[in-house]
Image (cartoon, rainbow, N blue to C red):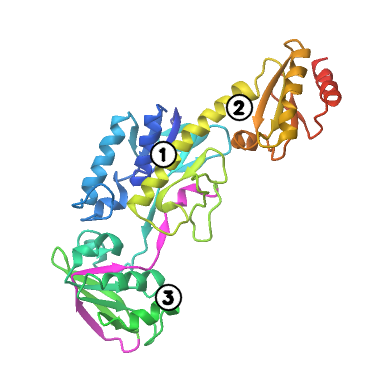
């Protein structure tokens, strides 16, 4: 078997949707050597949306495909390399993260996961013929206005289905809801249920499930099957909205990153996962609102944080844990007078060793990420390390005799 080619980058972005491309733009603009990997279609699910009217900067609206083409063009402007291939596996265990494809192993300091999610579908006959821009939609916020004055169907009775169905009544003439339960029973919260039942534009088909989808080039009928009588009901509709859940595209992670119960990636507000140097953005994250605008915000944050992470890493390796002299790190707080007042003392100690000791000073709050790398969350603190960059002691004892004594033992 032929050995895989190995390529190194500063940043590898997995996924070419709105979030991934935005992260790539930010990383590329920061002059980081950036690679974006997309397995099928640049732009992701947004390219299937005929009309986007709620993305800022387009008062007349735009198409999903048109908007994503602009993203793609901007991505190329900043020299981000693009590979159209499928990621088979990842390894985040080392300092250099590994992303495996069929032919190549990509190594990088930072990986940004932007693989998005996919709507759950009914898998009924004919469904694939009408997905996305041919009559089946998964986003009421995206496609509601395009269905003004029309008849639409909603599949599902959970919170998302009923709340989105209610939203659709602001535009559509009629919203028909297919519910698998008995009359009056839904899976949504009670407030949404009562509001939906009282909405004159909403009609419910109880004890039903989708049997098939029919149409000539575009969806025309959703055939429902009554679960009690077995009867079939071909319902004429202009659009069918499916709200039976989403599935995140996280299978390729294969245990390399902790996931939520629903299979999503959990991050903090800076898009950081539990593994340093690994970020996640867009619909693959555990979050409430999944829109192009929110994916862009995620991507901007992750792209910025990627540059910060790499800069911090370089500072940590070359300056904080330098390998030329015995090291002393003093962790303090600029807002804490006692620890701040020890700064001159630490500088005095460094001078006494006549170039044999290197002092680095870290503010616990301003330099939080660097302190996190040292597993230091208290101040004041002294950290001692060898010429090989190996930390040998961390102590809250910052008196001069103790600090000098410890340094002498390392210098000797």
Q: Which mark is residue 188?
A: 3
Q: Please determine whether, in this image, residue 122 is positioned above or below residue 254.
A: below
Q: Position of residue 351 (x, y in %)?
A: 74, 13
Q: Position of residue 188 (x, y in %)?
A: 42, 75
Q: Which residues are magenta?
A: 228-255
Q: Quadrant of residue 388?
A: top right
Q: Please determine whether, in this image, residue 56 is positioned above or below residue 100.
A: below
Along the line of sight, which residue is nearer the eye, 84 or 34? 34
Q: Secondary structure at mark 3?
A: loop
Identify residue for label 2: 316
CB within 8 Å, label 3 to label 1: no
Q: Which mark is residue 278?
A: none
The CA span between labels 3 and 1 is: 36 Å
The answer to which of marks 3 and 1 sits earlier in the sequence is 1
Residue 114 in sight here: no
Residue for point 40% across, 33% down: 27
In the picture, measured across the screen, residue 315 lies left or right of residue 111, that is: right
Label 2: how many Cα within 10 Å (few below 14, some 14–19, many 20+): some
Q: Secondary structure at mark 2?
A: helix
In the picture, measured across the screen, residue 286 lies left or right of residue 146, that is: right
Label 1: how many Cα within 10 Å (few below 14, some 14–19, many 20+): many
The answer to which of marks 3 and 2 sits earlier in the sequence is 3
The CA span between labels 1 and 2 is: 24 Å
Q: Secondary structure at mark 1?
A: strand
Q: Position of residue 227 (x, y in %)?
A: 34, 84
Q: Please determine whether, in this image, residue 265 is positioned above or below residue 387.
A: below
Q: Position of residue 28 (x, y in %)?
A: 37, 31
Q: Quadrant of the C terminus?
A: top right
Q: Which mark is residue 13?
A: 1
Label 3: how many Cα within 10 Å (few below 14, some 14–19, many 20+): some
Q: Quadrant of residue 376?
A: top right
Q: Please determine whether, in this image, residue 306 is positioned above or below residue 234.
A: above
């Amino acid at each position: 078997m032929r050995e895989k080619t190995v390529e190194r980058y500063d940043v590898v972005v997995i996924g070419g949707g709105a979030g991934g491309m935005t992260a790539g733009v930010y990383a590329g603009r920061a002059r980081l050597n950036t690679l974006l990997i997309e397995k099928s279609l640049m732009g992701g699910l947004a390219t299937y949306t005929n009309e986007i009217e709620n993305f800022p900067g387009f008062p007349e609206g735009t198409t999903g495909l048109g908007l994503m083409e602009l993203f793609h063009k901007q991505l190329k402007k900043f020299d981000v390399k693009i590979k159209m291939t499928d990621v088979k596996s990842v390894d985040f265990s080392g300092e250099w993260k590994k992303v495996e494809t069929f032919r190549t192993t990509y190594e990088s300091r930072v990986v940004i996961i932007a693989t998005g999610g996919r709507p759950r579908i009914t898998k009924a006959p004919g469904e694939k013929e009408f997905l996305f821009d041919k009559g089946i939609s998964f986003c009421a916020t995206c496609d509601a206005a395009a269905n003004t004055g029309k008849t639409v169907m909603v599949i599902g009775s959970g919170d998302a289905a009923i709340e989105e169905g209610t939203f659709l009544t602001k535009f559509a003439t009629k919203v028909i809801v297919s519910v698998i339960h008995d009359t009056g029973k839904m899976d949504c919260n009670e407030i949404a249920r009562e509001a939906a039942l009282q909405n004159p534009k909403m009609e419910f088909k109880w004890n039903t499930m989708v049997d098939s989808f029919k149409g000539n080039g575009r969806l025309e009928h959703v055939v429902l099957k009554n679960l009690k009588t077995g009867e079939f009901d071909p319902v004429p509709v202009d659009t069918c909205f499916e709200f039976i859940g989403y599935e995140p595209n996280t299978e390729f992670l294969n245990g390399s990153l902790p996931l939520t119960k629903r299979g999503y990636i959990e991050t903090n507000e800076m898009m950081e996962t539990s593994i340093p140097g690994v970020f996640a953005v867009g619909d693959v994250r555990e979050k409430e609102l999944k829109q192009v605008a929110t994916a862009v915000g995620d991507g901007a944050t992750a792209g910025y944080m990627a540059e910060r992470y790499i800069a911090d890493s370089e500072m940590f390796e070359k300056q904080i844990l330098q390998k030329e002299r015995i090291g002393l790190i003093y962790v303090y707080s600029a807002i804490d007078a006692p620890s701040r007042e020890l700064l001159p003392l630490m500088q005095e100690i460094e001078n006494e060793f006549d170039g044999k000791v290197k002092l680095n000073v870290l503010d616990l709050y301003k330099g939080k990420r660097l302190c996190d790398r040292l597993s230091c969350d208290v101040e004041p603190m002294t950290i001692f390390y060898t010429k090989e960059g190996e930390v040998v002691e961390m102590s809250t004892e910052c008196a001069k005799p103790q600090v000098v004594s410890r340094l002498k033992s390392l210098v000797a």
